[in-house]
Image (cartoon, rainbow, N blue to C red):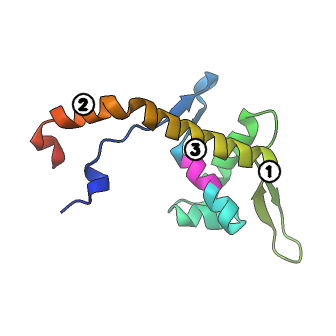
Amino acid sequence: MKSPAVDTLTPILRISFPHEDRLGRGKMELLEHIRETGSISAAGRAMDMSYRRAWLLVSDMNRMFREPVVESQRGGPKGGGAALTPFGDELLARFRKMEQMMKTALAEELAWLEANRSPESNR
């Protein structure tokens, strides 16, 4: 049996930038894990992705904006680490706010879709 959250219609925010850059929930989840763990490697593991993939996503985000989103430190006595910059914190907060605004704005339409979808779509 599926949980109610799995059976609920959910709008997903993804912002497409020119030249095929995208900003979406996966990158935001990665930022949350980096904030929690202080590590790109640990954040990637938490999402079942390789360090290389996580690092490439961070690199993409840092390239997409005028200011860095994540700063990393190599090696050293504590073995390095990573942290969201103040800009990265604001980016994450604003993206989450946009998601909430989208859900609020679409609530009535989603309820209509939910009321009219086929029972077979619940499988």
Q: On the rendered structure, is 60 left or right of 50?
A: right
- Nearer the viewer's eye, disc 3 or disc 1? 3
Q: Which residues are magenta?
A: 26-31
- What element does badge 3 sit on? helix
Report helix, strand or loop for mark 1. loop
> Residue flagged by tag 3: what amino acid is it?
Arg
Q: Position of residue 40 (x, y in %)?
A: 68, 61
Give the spatial CA distance, label 3 vs label 1: 17 Å
Q: Residue at x 30, y 41 (%)?
A: 9
Residue highlighted by disc 1: 85
Q: Residue at x 36, y 41 (%)?
A: 10
Q: Nearer the viewer, residue 35 or 94?
A: 94
From the image, tell me which residue sits under label 2: 112
- In the image, taking residue 110 as reference, residue 28 lies left or right, namely right
Point out the frontmost of discs 1 and 2. 2
Tell me whether circle 1 and circle 2 mark residues in contact (CB < 8 Å): no
